[in-house]
Image (cartoon, rainbow, N blue to C red):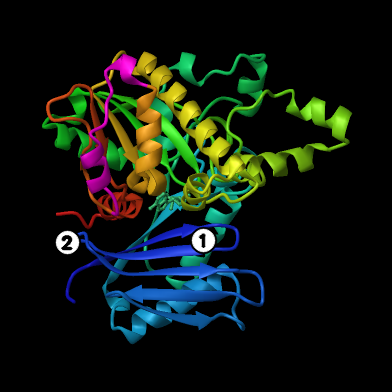
């Protein structure tokens, strides 16, 4: 192992995902997932060449402890001396960042200033950055923002119809998320179409536990479904997506629920889980629906109908569609979600070839519309880690 390696970190409030990527081949060398951080049950699982093993973090159960355990693992494999830079997924960069940056104290101050915009995510991302600085004091850290790709959205797409003062005073506007995924998927989809991302109109649906959709025209985000926070838009695993904002006053008056309870309900108890009363997991919803579970059937219908409505509305932002692209855990794997959604969209010329739909799953990329049909429907597995590694390599001066 003589190549330079890039460490990619993605920190949640109680979790840390890590990926070590070879800067030359761009291949994944090893990965890790730490969970239950900040509790005595914290552990970290390492995966390399298909082999997994777990280490408990009892005596060092915070994010710094997890990064320390990762360093120990890399040392035992003789990898640590090859690590040359660290890339961090950062959820909210506000309006300040339209691209990735080398992290210094100024950047950290800006991220702290963005905490009101992402109170759940940015503090965790900052914890990860601090942990990396502590454990790897000599390595450069690069921040890659979920919001950055959407900074090209026009004002009419990002402005909420509320008093303008709220934007001027508090930055209350639509930002959008999953930008790193869209930035990877858009050129990959264009290549599949045999064209350049600068010359096509794509509607990309990133459907995972969190889900959003993006209108990409000539390589730029023109609109997206998430807003000031990742709660707006599509039906997600546990998030409601769009709902009448009166939900707050309605539930305060009728159910005695305070603001925190409603926010918690909309983020953690809604979406597929809330409708189905079964699960937030799309696989369980599909199985339930197949077995006749009423809640699961309804969850599936609400999710795919909302998604189809959003796809049609995003065509306004792009001024037409060259391809609809599915990505994320659900988009990459669920034949049923793809099929049900596209069935609503025949009037836009969208159609699915069910054989291709069945064949394009579990990491495969490809065209799932009938041969030669325009617009095309594509499946493109996302790779946010690779995107973060490539930005990190470039900004750390490691790219050839
Ligand atoms: P992500 O957040 O991108 O990892 O995606 C997680 C979601 O993908 C969960 O709702 C999973 O149930 C869903 N998913 C993964 N594999 C499949 C599959 N084979 N069929 C349907 N949904 C899947």
* Residue 314 position within the rendered picture, expressed as x and y whole percent measured from the top left: 40, 20
Element under disc 2 = loop
Quadrant showing the N terminus? bottom left
Q: Is residue 298 left or right of residue 132?
A: right
Q: Residues within 10 Å of mark 2 (few under 14, many from 20)?
A: some
Which mark, by number, is residue 72? Answer: none
> Residue at position x 56%, y 60% from top?
127
Label 1 vs 2, first from the N-terminus:
2
Q: In percent of the image, x 51 and y 49: which residue is there?
A: 291
Q: Is residue 71 left or right of residue 124?
A: left
Which residue is more in the foreground, 234 or 334? Answer: 334
Mark 1 to mark 2: distance in Å?
25 Å
Mark 1 lies on residue: 128
Q: From the viewer's perspective, is 385 left or right of 373?
A: right
Q: Which residue is mark 2?
A: 24
Vertical arrangement, residue 176 with respect to residue 322, above or below? below
State the SS at label 1: helix
Q: Do we see residue 68 in this rendering?
A: yes
- Circle 1: is it few (<14), some (14-19), or many (20+) Cα within 10 Å? many
Q: Quadrant of residue 27?
A: bottom left
Along the line of sight, which residue is nearer the eye, 370 or 184? 370
x, y percentage for residue 345?
A: 35, 21
Q: Is residue 2 positioned above or below 257 on the image?
A: below
Contact (Cβ within 8 Å) of mark 1 with mark 2 = no
Asked where in the image residue 62 lies, by quadrant, the reply is bottom right
Residue at 81%, 26% (x, y): give it: 249
Check residue 206 for magenta coloring. no
- Residue numbers of the magenta segment: 345-362
Could you say which quadrant of the image residue 139 lies in?
bottom left
């Amino acid at each position: 192992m003589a190549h330079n390696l890039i460490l990619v970190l993605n920190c949640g409030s109680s979790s840390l995902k890590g990926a070590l990527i070879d800067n030359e081949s761009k291949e994944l060398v090893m990965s890790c997932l730490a969970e239950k951080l900040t509790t005595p049950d914290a552990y970290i699982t390492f995966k390399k060449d298909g082999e997994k093993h777990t280490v408990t973090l009892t005596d060092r159960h915070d994010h710094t402890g997890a990064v320390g355990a990762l360093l120990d693992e890399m040392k035992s494999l003789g990898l640590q001396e090859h690590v040359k830079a660290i890339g961090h997924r950062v959820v909210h960069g506000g309006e300040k960042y339209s691209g990735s940056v080398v992290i210094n104290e100024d950047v950290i101050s800006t991220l702290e200033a963005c905490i009101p915009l992402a109170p759940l995510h940015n503090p965790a991302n900052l914890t990860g950055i601090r942990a990396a600085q502590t454990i790897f004091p000599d390595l450069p850290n690069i921040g890659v923002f979920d919001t950055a790709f959407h900074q090209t959205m026009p004002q009419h797409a990002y402005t909420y119809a509320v008093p303008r003062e709220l934007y001027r005073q508090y930055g209350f506007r639509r930002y959008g998320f999953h930008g790193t995924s869209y930035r990877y998927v858009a050129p990959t989809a264009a290549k599949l179409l045999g064209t350049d991302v600068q010359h096509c109109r794509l509607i990309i649906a990133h459907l995972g536990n969190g889900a959003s959709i993006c209108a990409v025209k000539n390589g730029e985000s023109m609109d997206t479904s998430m807003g000031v926070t990742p709660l707006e838009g599509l039906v997600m695993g546990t998030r409601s997506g769009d709902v009448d904002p009166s939900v707050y006053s309605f539930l305060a008056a009728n159910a005695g629920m305070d603001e925190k309870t409603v926010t918690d309900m909309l983020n953690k108890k809604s979406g597929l889980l809330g409708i189905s009363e079964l699960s937030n997991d799309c696989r369980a919803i599909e199985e339930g629906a197949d077995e006749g579970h009423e809640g699961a059937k309804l969850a599936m219908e609400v999710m795919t109908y909302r998604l189809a409505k959003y796809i049609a509305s995003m065509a306004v932002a792009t001024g037409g569609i060259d391809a609809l692209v599915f990505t994320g855990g659900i988009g990459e794997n669920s034949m049923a979600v793809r099929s049900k959604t596209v069935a609503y969209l025949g009037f836009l010329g969208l159609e699915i070839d069910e054989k291709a739909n069945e064949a394009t799953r579990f990491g495969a990329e490809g065209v799932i519309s009938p041969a030669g049909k325009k617009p095309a429907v594509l499946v493109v597995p996302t790779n946010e880690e690779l995107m973060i590694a490539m930005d990190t390599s470039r900004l750390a001066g490691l790219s050839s």
